[in-house]
Image (cartoon, grey):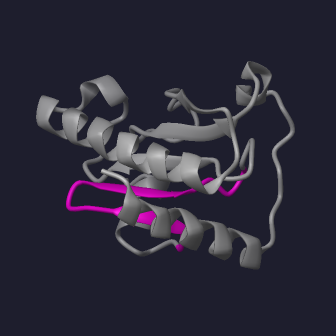
Amino acid sequence: MSSVFTKIIQGEIPCYKVAEDHSNIAFLDIRPLQRGHLLCVPKVEVDELYELPKEAYDSLMSFSQRVAKALKQSVKCKRVGSIVLGMEVPHAHIHLVPINTESELSFTNEHLNFTQAEMLELASTISDALDSVE
């Protein structure tokens, strides 16, 4: 059975896409910890990040680095925190979360809600920032 992320990758479920290449996709988390919280997901479906073949793992890390740079340009923050949990969806992924303090990077915090218009605008802003990062 396909994961929810595979369904997003295949276009069966909509998302607020920020970036995509031949091997990976990045989209905004619909239950964000902070404004700009997004997920970087390999298109190959494996349960855990460290189960990815080396080439796919390296590709995801490079992709995530580029997306994190664009995120930091787009959302005012001290850092872009990274979390690898993968407990909620059995498909490898990396959470990128703009933060100013470590405590903002906890899944025990209340999740935020944004309107569809706010999510679309934010996704577009981050996507546009990708043009200026390497």
Specify whether 39 is left or right of 53: right
Query: Does the segment drawn in magenta span residue 16?
Result: yes
| Residue name at image x 81 percent, y 44 percent | 111
Image coordinates of residue 125 in percent, x first then y, are 58, 68
Q: Is residue 70 left or right of residue 34?
A: left
Q: Is residue 124 magenta?
A: no
Camera-side residue of 37 and 93: 37
Q: Position of residue 132 (x, y in %)?
A: 39, 60
| Residue that protrudes farthest toward the front in the picture | 132
The residue at the point 74 percent across, 79 percent down is 117
- In screen coordinates, is 106 left or right of 60? right
- Which residue occupies 47% across, 44% down? 68
Q: Residue furthest bottom?
A: 117
Relative depth, front residue between 128 and 39:
128
> Looking at the image, how many numbered discs can be counted on the residues?
0
Q: Position of residue 80 (x, y in %)?
A: 58, 35
- The vertical placement of 103 against 98, above or below, is above
Residues shaded magenta: 14-31
Q: Residue at x 37, y 29 (%)?
A: 48
From the viewer's perspective, is residue 92 above or below residue 40? above
Above or below for 75 versus 104: below
